[in-house]
Image: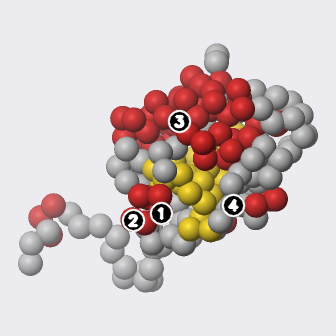
Amino acid sequence: MLISKQIETVVRELAAAARLQAGQLLVIGCSTSEVAGQKIGTSGTSATAEAIYAGIEAVRAEIGFHPVFQCCEHLNRALVIERAAAERYGLEVVAAVPVAKAGGSMAAYAYRTLPDACLVESVQAHAGIDIGDTFIGMHLRRVAVPLRPTIRSIGEAHLTMAYTRPKLIGGERAVYGLEDNQRSC
């Protein structure tokens, strides 16, 4: 199966499990080197990034979530995001331009492809995909729920996914949902 189709499949699975909605954030961490079977940060390619982006874009076009692409450690795991989304979420824009050797091939490709892209230091995304063990957890909301995809690797890269849910607060008396007949007071 082509990389773009694999990505489209797993993004659809995650979107369904997360009940991802228009305007929500999906963080993507990706090592295109790992996809190619190489050590992270050594052999990234824009062709692989393009295929991954295409799979994400196919689902984004239908749902309307905001993709957020994590840079590598050389840019302190900053994130590529559309400026309108950064403004919507009140995120502070930082000054850097990701390139293959400082940011990674995926982030560099996204920066050049997303409309009016900018860089921010952190987000609290509603869901995330990690291709190649790039560690996206710092960019997810506080309660992350792992999701086991039907496809466990993209190329040679290990794949993990998670979505988030609100914290459950309270104790044994807490109620977390209303029955239909309890909706009006």
- The answer to whether residue 86 is above or below residue 156 is below
Tell me the element at label 3: helix
| Residue under numbered circle 4 | 96
If you read the primary sequence from the N terminus, does the residue marked by circle 1 or circle 4 appear first?
1
Using the numbered discs, state the Cα–Cα distance from disc 1 to disc 4 in whole angstroms: 15 Å
Q: Nearer the viewer, residue 68 or 145?
A: 68
| Residue under numbered circle 1 | 86
Tell me the element at label 2: helix
What residue appears at the point 36 percent right and 35 percent down from the top-left corner?
62
If you read the primary sequence from the N terminus, does the residue marked by circle 3 or circle 2 appear first?
3
| Amino acid type, residue under disc 3 in the picture | Ile
- The answer to whether residue 27 is above or below residue 139 is above
If you read the primary sequence from the N terminus, does the residue marked by circle 1 or circle 3 appear first?
3
Query: Are there few (<14), some (14-19), or many (20+) residues within 10 Å of tag 3?
Result: many
* Residue furthest left in the image: 185
| Residue under numbered circle 2 | 88
Residue 56's disc is 3
The residue mark sitting in front, 3 or 4, is: 4
Query: Are there few (<14), some (14-19), or many (20+) residues within 10 Å of tag 1?
Result: many
Query: Are there few (<14), some (14-19), or many (20+) residues within 10 Å of tag 4?
Result: few
Tell me the element at label 1: helix
Q: Residue 42 sits in which quadrant?
A: top right
Number of numbered discs present? 4
